Image (tube, grey):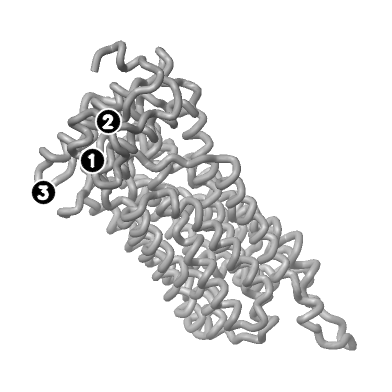
Amino acid sequence: MSQGQARTPRTSLSTPSLSRRNSPHARPETDSFPFPLSSSALSREDITTRLLAEEAEEDDEEPTGGKRRVDSPDGGAGEGLSPLDETLEKIGMGRYQKSLLVLCGFGWMADNMWLQCVAVILPRVQEHYDVSDRWIGLLSASIFAGMMVGAWGWGSYSDAQGRTPAFNFTLLLTSVFGLLSAFAPSFPWLCAALFGLGTGVGGSMPTDGTLFLENVPPTQHYLLTALSAFFSLGAVLTSLLGLLIIPRYSCPEHPLPDSPPCDVDVENLGWRYMLGSLAVVSITFFICRILFFRLQESAKYLVSAGRPSEAIIALQRISRINGDEAVIFNVFLPKYLEQKVGEVAGDGGREQSLRDYVLYTVSGMPGSLLGAYLIETSWGRRGTMAISTVATSLATFVFVLVSSQAGVVVSSMVVSLAATLMYAVIYSYTPEVFSPAIRGTASGIASALSRLAGIIAPILTGLMLSIHVSLPLFVSAACFAVTAACMVMLPIETRGGPKVVGVGH
């Protein structure tokens, strides 16, 4: 192709070498780009050449390992970048990527928003349906079970059918089942609705994280860690709504001696209002994704699926859009705070515990930003994960041992900061270390395993609470310590150029 041909306003889609390698789903050679290419644009010739080189590299790849991306010491793109990554670097971090950052952030926000909602409403649901401590853990176990199914299912689906369906429909499912949960007539129905909700929101973090990672330049991958700021924001939103709604629309905390029993169907509706409010928020997120943004399929997915011609179109459209044509602790914390703070505060312990919970959620917000900085230091991904996990373990021990209200609040805030930092790095490291062909499935499985722990933990916690109120937190702190030791032994550090884990590993 000559230079003049590359600048022709409407250029045929496929070169002979590309069409020979295309999958049956690729467009025929008679197709053309739906918009003109300006002289300053990232030309189709540039993208085609790089994608052909990408395919050649995949053909020459060693059977026992993947490609290694090497960044320069100053964080810029090095000579070891794959051709497709070089193309993403040339496209840059423009309006498309920034919009995607916010919209993927909505998915991460919804994940934590609903998890914290279950934590906030759990004491009121227990009172409403008169559920014992032994069985109330089924409430959180239900949403975790749904999240496990959703993480594995949507992750695998995104590797087989593309990233777009998961991006659009996870929040739709979340919204529908969120509304149904607000009208649940019984405890089993509420658990069933939360399971359905979990199948939607559980797919958001692994699939949205994968989608975002595959659309930003490699030198901007640290933003995946910063994406966790939305995760923290979800907890803050829920805690603030809980503070506004729960005290006002719940049974009296200290009824008068001669007052009639609380009519839960009339006076204890705050937890339903919470579920309904968050369902409306989720619907708003879904509408923003559908009406105000047109998602292009991931070029890395398309190349790995043998559809490079469609990847060319997607990259060209993104370039044009840019304007250059070139678990235990969190689930039971409100209940624990209500009991522990109530011992000190007396009347008003419920509202005070919700105020303390707001402080807990707000204190976690800097964790994601701190993580985005630390992973690019000499600590790297593994070091930052291990150190933050140890800090979480120590802070949890302190939280259990202190007795003053100030000590409880401060130690819980430290737990929040350290845990948010830990999760931010975990959710960025995982998709980085896997190749595009299996990234969605691998991230989904990892997320599903964490949800499995979320199913088991609340049930075990309910049993341990009957032994001693602090036992679940001691166990949680010990688990964090063991996890930190495992993190140190991880074989791959993705800072400075990850060795991508492929199908053969």
Tell me whether circle 2 and circle 1 mark residues in contact (CB < 8 Å): yes
Distance CA(mark 2)–CA(mark 1): 9 Å
**For numbered disc 2, what is the local secondary structure?**
loop
Q: Which of 477 and 38 is in front in this view?
A: 38
Q: How crowded is mark 1: few (under 14 residues within 10 Å), some or many (20 or more)?
A: some
Mark 1 or 3, closer to the camera:
1
What residue do we see at 44% from left, 53% from top? 165
Q: Where is residue 270 in the image (x, y as percent from the top left)?
A: 74, 69
Residue at label 3?
Answer: 64
Instruction: State which tag comes first along the sequence, 2 or 1.
Output: 2
Instruction: State which tag comes first along the sequence, 1 or 3.
Output: 1
Q: Position of residue 330 (x, y in %)?
A: 53, 64
Residue at label 1?
Answer: 22
**Amino acid of disc 1:** Asn
Residue at label 2?
Answer: 14
What residue do we see at 33% from left, 50% from top? 430
The answer to which image quadrant residue 77 occupies is top left
Whether residue 364 appears in this view of the structure is no
**For numbered disc 3, what is the local secondary structure?**
loop
Whether residue 215 appears in this view of the structure is yes
What is the quadrant of the N terminus in the image?
A: top left
Q: Nearer the viewer, residue 354 or 410?
A: 354
Residue 81 versus residue 195 in the image, above or below: above
Residue 71 versus residue 106 in the image, above or below: above
